[in-house]
Amino acid sequence: MPELYQKLEEIVSKKYISNSLYVRHAYSRTVDPVLQGVPDIVIRPKDAQEVSEILKIANEENIAVIPRGGGDCEFGGSKPIDDSGIVLDLKRMNNVVNLDQENLIVTVEAGISWGKLNDYLCNFGLYTGCLGPGSGLTASVGGGISHQSVGGGGCAKYGSCTNQLVSLEVVLPTGEIIETGSQANKYSKFPFNRFGNGPDFSSIFCGDNGIFGVKTQASLQIFPKPPFADYKTFLMPRKSEEISAKIFTEIRRKGIDIYDSMYFMDLLVRVGTEKGIFPLWENLKRKRGTMFYTVEANTEKELEEKVKQVDKIFLQNKAEELGPEIADGNIGKWHYVEQGHWLIAHNLWGLIPGFTALDAECHTPIAAYPGILKDVELWDLEHSNEMEKILEISGMRPISGAGPIILIGDHNVELTTGVTSFESYIDGKNYEIIEELNIKLWKSLLERITKHGVTWYMLGDILSRLLIEIGAFQPEYLQFLKSVKKTLDPRFILSRGKFNFWGENGKKIS
């Protein structure tokens, strides 16, 4: 290992590499509660060439490399699965490379956060359309592309952040550097088109969860931010889950150009208000589900017409409009005006100290999510014994339910559902039984939701391996996935262990 460390240090200099126990342990955690692997080395390259040299050495030494962007992933996607490997921290690569205002395309290093990028773009009256994931203040552009992220704002209008992708610079697991889209043509002077020059190879790296290559630069479409916007929040009637789905469906069927719309289920509003994370709803007489929408327009007349159409749908479904200001409960205004788009998704972590979210983030048709939420209630009843054991230690029963349900591209929603439980360390003592129960509950819930036929977009290590273990993939699809992996990464260096891809003689852990 000292020889490997020396080789890597020569690439990045002493300042950007560490094998300190403290640093290694810091990189063994992400947002998820599972401590599963500690890396041998943490390294911060500055560009694609340094990434390439690191990967070539890793292949020679047959040691795993784990790319890490913002480290916000909820399923352990940017940390080792086993106690070994090199964590490739890309946050040093966080610059805007070029802003092409004529063609409305921005090229950035993949380690830049969505927050930093959009803060830069707003100086020119521009934005990225989809603002990336809800963790966009710290989540990286490369990580968002690796997960096909949604949730940060603009998803009802623009869909996943990968819809905006024009081209990529990617370092393949064996160290070769390629560019996709228009940049595959060596005579192309600037990125302008994703589709052409043969197959759409950009898409291989969209949603790959970091197993096919290391993204080092990305070129994205950008959009002028319309000068007019309106946002309204409504208190829902009884049976709010079914009514919210009906409203989402009617918005899509009428073809209304809506920027965002979200639904907060009754339980989330009630418990969140009790715990102080929704102060704007404390004065609501009825703590029921709420729903908001945002529309944008280039003229006042266009905005007025859109608002009229959307208001009609809400009011016909007996939703009650709250006041226009944030203080009136208008979370839609907070979401759009106060950068709530990068804060709203984090209510599951903020209920009380020590709470941790064992959640599930997927896409599903609008019509399907009320049935999934009802099944989560049944699942909760079926696992009362495990919940009670945690209650006996923590003094509070875990809570199952859903975070904001977000209208995204087409007739789909992003559904974040799960159970909020406790970390195993409580009042100065570590309870291994809580850790065991948390993993059991989490995997049980993920399997249950998988069987509703959802599509998972953030897989990491926890979910990617679970899908293999429960046989969720069609055999032919799984074989094709593995064949592509083996072609690009013969020694299974990159993100080793995800999807249980360990290599020919690789170690497999539960």
Image (cartoon, rainbow, N blue to C red):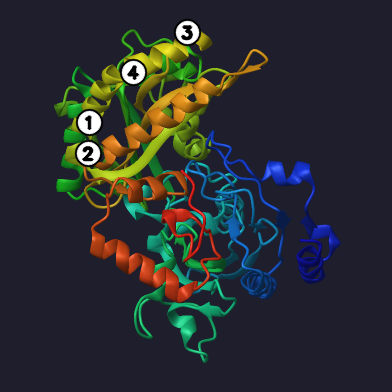
Residue 267 - label: 4
Which mark sits nearer the N-terminus, 4 or 1?
A: 1
| Mark 2 touches mark 1? (CB < 8 Å) | yes
Q: Is mark 2 on a helix, strand or loop?
A: helix
Extreme residue toward the right, this view: 14
| Mark 3 touches mark 1? (CB < 8 Å) | no
Residue 248 - label: 2
Question: What kind of residue is marked 1?
Answer: Ser
Q: What element carries label 4?
A: helix
Give the distance between the C-alpha atoms of the residues marked 2 and 3, in whole angstroms.
41 Å
Give the distance between the C-alpha atoms of the residues marked 3 and 1, in whole angstroms.
36 Å
Q: Pointer 2: residues within 10 angstroms few (<14), some, or many (20+)?
A: many
Residue 244 - label: 1
Residue 475 - label: none
Give the distance between the C-alpha atoms of the residues marked 4 and 1, in whole angstroms.
14 Å
Q: Pointer 1: residues within 10 angstroms few (<14), some, or many (20+)?
A: many
Which mark sits nearer the N-terminus, 3 or 4?
A: 4
